[in-house]
Image (cartoon, rainbow, N blue to C red):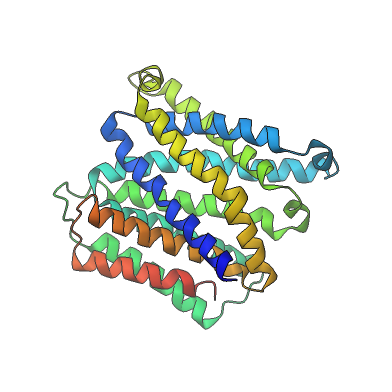
Amino acid sequence: MIPSIASLVLVGLGWTLTGAVMGAAPKRKIDPGAIQLLGAVFSSLVCLSLLDWTALGAIPAQVRLLTFLSFFFCGALNCVMLYLMAYAMQKGPNGIIWAVIQSAMIFPFLLGVAVFGESPKPVRIAGLCAILFSLILSGAGRDNTGKGKEWKIPAFTAFLLTGLVHILATLPSFFESSRALPPPFRILATGAGVLITSAGILLFRRGGSPLKANLRSKYLWIYTGLLQGFGLISACLLQYPAMDALARHGIGGASYPIMIASCLVGFSLFSLLYLKERLTFLQYAALGCCVAGIPLICL
C-alpha cells in the first residue's frame, strides 16, 4: 500500500508542472493553445501506437463511441479552462487560483451522491463544506498582487469548467463496460478534444494565430516536453496501477484526494518559494480549508 500511495503523491506533485507552465507560458509569449496543440499531437501518436486494436474491437461499438465522446468533451473543455487559468494567473495570485480550480473535484462527489446513489457520509459533507468555505474565502479575500480583481471571474469560470471536466472524466468509470477500455484509448479521446479545440482557437483568434511564431520558440518545445513526458509516463506507470491497487484494498476513493492534495501543497510551495507570492490571512485560510476538505470528501 505504501508504494501505491507514494506513487500517487509523486503524480500529484508532478501536476504542479501544469500550473507552473500555464502561469509562465504567457510571460514567454507562448500561447497556451500552442502547448496544448503540440502536446495533443504527441500524446495521440503515442497512444495510437500503444492500443491493442484486436482487444478494442471486442468491446461494443456503442460503448466505445459514448466513452470516446465523454473523454473528447473532457479534453475540449479542459483546453478552454487552461486558457482561462493562464489568463487569471497573469492577473492574480497563482497559488490561490490553482487551489480554487482544483476544488472542482466536489462535482464528481455531487454526481455520485445525486445520480448514482453513493452515501453522503457526515465526514464527506464536512469535506464538501470545507471546500465550499475555501471558495468563499478565496473570493472575499483582499488581493495582495496589486493587479486588482480581474482574476476572479476567469478563475471561478475555470473552476466551473473543471467541474464539468471531472464529471466527464469520471462518468465512464461508473459503468463496467466502459472500464474495459484501456488508458491509451481514454488519453487518445481526450487528446482529440484538445487537438480540435486548441487548433480552432489558434486559427480563429482575434489578431491572427501565434502558432508559427511559437513553433520557433524553444520554450514551446521545453514546456510541451515537460508536460507530456511526465504526464504519459506517470499515467501509464504510476497513476493507473496505483489507483487499481488502492481500489483492490477498498480505498479507491482516496486516489484523487491524495493526488490533488499533493498537487495543492506542491503548487503552494512553488508559489511561495519561486514566485515569491505573498498571500493574505484569508487566502492562507482558504488554502488550508481546501487541503483539509479534499481528503475528507472521499473517506
Q: Quarter of the image holding residue 245?
A: bottom right
Residue 70 in the image, given as x and y percentages of width and height: 64, 45
The single residue placed furthest to the right in the displayed view is 58
Would residue 184 be found to the left or right of residue 215 on screen? right
Which image quadrant for residue 88? top left
The quarter in which the C terminus is drawn is bottom right
Task: Give the image location of residue 72, x and y in percent.
Answer: 61, 39
Q: Is residue 62 left or right of residue 25?
A: right
The N terminus, quarter of image: bottom right
**At 30% from the left edge and 59% from the top edge, which residue is drawn?**
269
Outermost residue toward the left in this view: 146
Pick the residue in front: 153 or 88: 88
Q: Position of residue 75 (x, y in %)?
A: 55, 41
Q: Residue furthest bottom?
A: 122
**Towards the viewer: 81 or 291:** 291
Q: Is residue 140 visible?
A: yes
The residue that appears at 51% across and 76% down in the rendered structure is: 124
Res 130 quadrant in image:
bottom left
Tell me if residue 170 can be seen.
no
What number of labels is visible?
Answer: 0
